[in-house]
Amino acid sequence: MTAPILSISRRTRETPFTSMNRDAAVKGYTVYNHMLLPTVFESIEADYHHLKRHVQLWDVACERQIEIRGPDAARLMQMLTPRDLRGMTPGQCYYVPIVDETGGMMNDPVALKFSDDRFYISIADSDLLFWAKGLAYGFRLDVDVNEPDVFPLAVQGPQADELMARVFGDQVRAIKFFRFSMLSFEGHEMPVARSGYSKQGGFEIYVTGAEIAGPLWARLMQAGEDLQVRAGCPNLIERIEGRLLSYGNDMTRENTPHECGLGRFCDTQTAIGCVGRDALLRVASEGPVRQIRNFSIDGDAVPPCTALWPVFADGERVGRISSAVWSPDFKTNVSIGMIRMTHWKDGTRVEVETPDGMRTATVREKSFT
Ligand code: THG
């Protein structure tokens, strides 16, 4: 049997790194924000081991930027999120839940603040641009909202500091977690942040202009040869172990940030202007009745999790699994799901209905890492 292919067209946008991925023998793609996102190079397990030991270059250009510019930029930003942005200073990144008027999750991006009148929102997979433009128009805000030619390149893994220092200088070592500096490469200035969709440490370079993507990729590859640098991508196993959520998979507009375990990124009381504030004030006072947890699912490797798997306790449905995969390091199936408060305590035993039968599983309050 041959695997089906993904037909690529103008809608499934290529990135400035697509030809580099091809040269690195990319084996799988998904589509994220209407753009190609590699999912596997050697194998998901080989990519995972390499990521945890060495350093990888990730084409995450699909983390599209929404640029908000103008006198009302800060006001629009605060309308979008229940996280209080008043303490955010230029050069900071904030992980920000974005909610609609019902308090439902619209996206879970990383925001970058350049100044009071300029931000980037580095979005997850939903068309947040239209919601932001709609709010700006509807409220007659004095802002420009657009998607600039910025293409994030992540450098992830334990050797990321060493590799980045060789290309951008020792100043990268001083960049703190979720902060960015404007650094230059061949005369191009770009934000370089200590962040990324893994728990292995590293940076994200917001490559400004497609023309510099090739030279930067080549320089990083050459500088990191002895560090065994290679192309990689967000890794399914590593991100589930670290409980990094995937919008559209682990949560949707049906969920509040509190259900997603993102209550620590909400300051609903003081986030004056957030369109979901009233709705969230109601749920924040009572607390959620179901929440995201990790689970370990017993038995050998589970099949790919491409739909929600029901979770049962004593024959009653109490939750669902949204991501699951075999972990070579933890020697169990690691997973992310949502479960009712009656069963969300650490160590609770439940049953998961997978496509190849019922499996026993254990709720984990903490992530695997
Ligand atoms: N980096 C950037 N943009 C992104 C992602 C990213 N856009 C899409 C997607 N990833 C958005 N989702 C996430 C999810 C988790 C995190 C970042 C973006 C993340 N979480 C830290 C954690 O859970 O450990 C917490 C961060 C904090 O403590 O503030 O990093 O990866 N540019």
Image: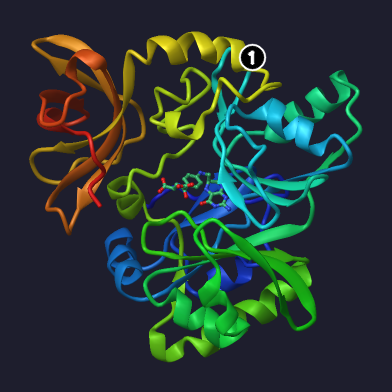
Taking 238 as reference, is 295 left or right?
A: left
Q: Is residue 355 above or below residue 89?
A: above
Q: Is residue 72 above or below residue 343?
A: below
Residue 226 x, y percent position in the rendering: 40, 91
Residue 246 x, y percent position in the rendering: 45, 39
Residue 304 x, y percent position in the rendering: 29, 41
Q: How many marks?
A: 1
Does the Cβ of the disc 1 residue fall within 8 Å of ligand 1?
no
Is the residue marked by circle 1 packed among few (<14), some (14-19), or many (20+) residues within 10 Å? some
Q: Is residue 316 above or below residue 38?
A: above
Can residue 220 be seen?
A: no
Query: What residue is at 36 percent from the left and 34 percent from the top?
Result: 306
Q: Nearer the viewer, residue 322 or 269?
A: 269
Query: What residue is at 17 percent from the left and 25 percent from the top?
Result: 345
Three-letter amino acid code at the position of disc 1: Glu
Tell me where residue 102 sits by quadrant.
top right
Q: Is residue 294 above or below residue 320?
A: below
* Colour scheme in use: rainbow
Tell me where residue 260 sits by quadrant.
top left
Can residue 141 be seen?
A: yes
Q: Nearer the viewer, residue 285 or 223?
A: 285
Taking 9 as reference, is 313 left or right?
A: left
Task: Please tell me whether mark 1 sits on a helix, a strand or a loop.
Answer: loop
Q: Which residue is mark 1?
A: 101
Query: What residue is at 37 percent from the left and 63 percent from the top?
Result: 200
Residue 56 x, y percent position in the rendering: 44, 71
Taking 163 as reference, is 53 left or right?
A: left
Q: Nearer the viewer, residue 239 or 43?
A: 239
